[in-house]
Amino acid sequence: MCTSKKRTHIDNRIRSIEENIKDKHIRNAYKEVGSLKSSFQPHTDLCRGANNEILSKVEEIKTRWKTYFLDLLTTTGTAEQNNPLGNTHANQTTTEEELEEEPPDILDIEMAIQSTHNNKSPCIDNIPTELYNKGGGLLINKIHSLIKGIWRE
């Protein structure tokens, strides 16, 4: 019974893929093929505690991350104890040149926007790259003023 339902489900998905190809919806067809080919991958919300115990409760995990980052940010030991590679922020010194570096000019921003490709999935801001590419000069000016403001803070 279960195998026949699974087979029917797969047949329906294959028909859907064929219809997408006929209707020239190639992206949807490839997306369905990818989901059909991928196998089940379980997602676990587990974390290891300070004593190497496994934490599964959300509050315990949040508390562990909080203490981890507090320990990371408020270290009192030497750089060699905290980081075997030795490249910590305490060891790095900033020069006056780095502090007084100019923000990117408008041409740099325009070239960066033009170098992005369409039909890519949006980043964390959920803004598709097509909007940046089609935004024109006004959008580039707004982005440039925003970057300059952030740069000077």
Image: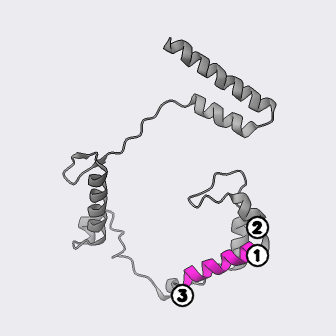
> Which residue is tagged 2?
135
For the point 24% across and 72% down, which residue is it?
Answer: 78
Give the foreground label among 1 and 3.
1
Question: SS class of the residue under badge 2?
Answer: loop
Residue 126 rendering spot, x and y as whole percentages: 61, 58
146 drawn magenta: yes
Residue 107 appears in the figure: no
Instruction: Answer left or right for 68 relative to 120.
Output: left
Whole-Å distance between the Cαs marked 3 and 2? 30 Å
Q: Residues within 10 Å of mark 1 (few under 14, many from 20)?
A: few
Which residue lies under the disc numbered 1?
138
Q: Which residues are magenta?
A: 139-152
**What element does badge 1 sit on?**
helix
Question: Which of the two discs, 1 and 3, labels the residue nearer the N terminus?
Answer: 3
Number of marks in picture: 3
| Residue furthest to the right | 23
Looking at the picture, tell me which residue is in the foreground, 72 or 89: 72
Quadrant for residue 86, please give it.
Answer: bottom left
User: Residue at (61%, 34%) from the top-left corner?
Assistant: 34
Give above or below for 9 relative to 69: above
Mark 3 closeness class: few <14, some 14–19, many ≥20 residues within 10 Å: few
Which picture quadrant has residue 118?
A: bottom right
* Relative to 20, residue 79 above or below: below
Q: Amino acid at mark 2?
A: Gly
Q: Is residue 83 left or right of residue 21?
A: left
Label 1 sits on what residue type?
Leu
Badge 2: few (under 14), some or many (20 or more) residues near its Cα, within 10 Å? few
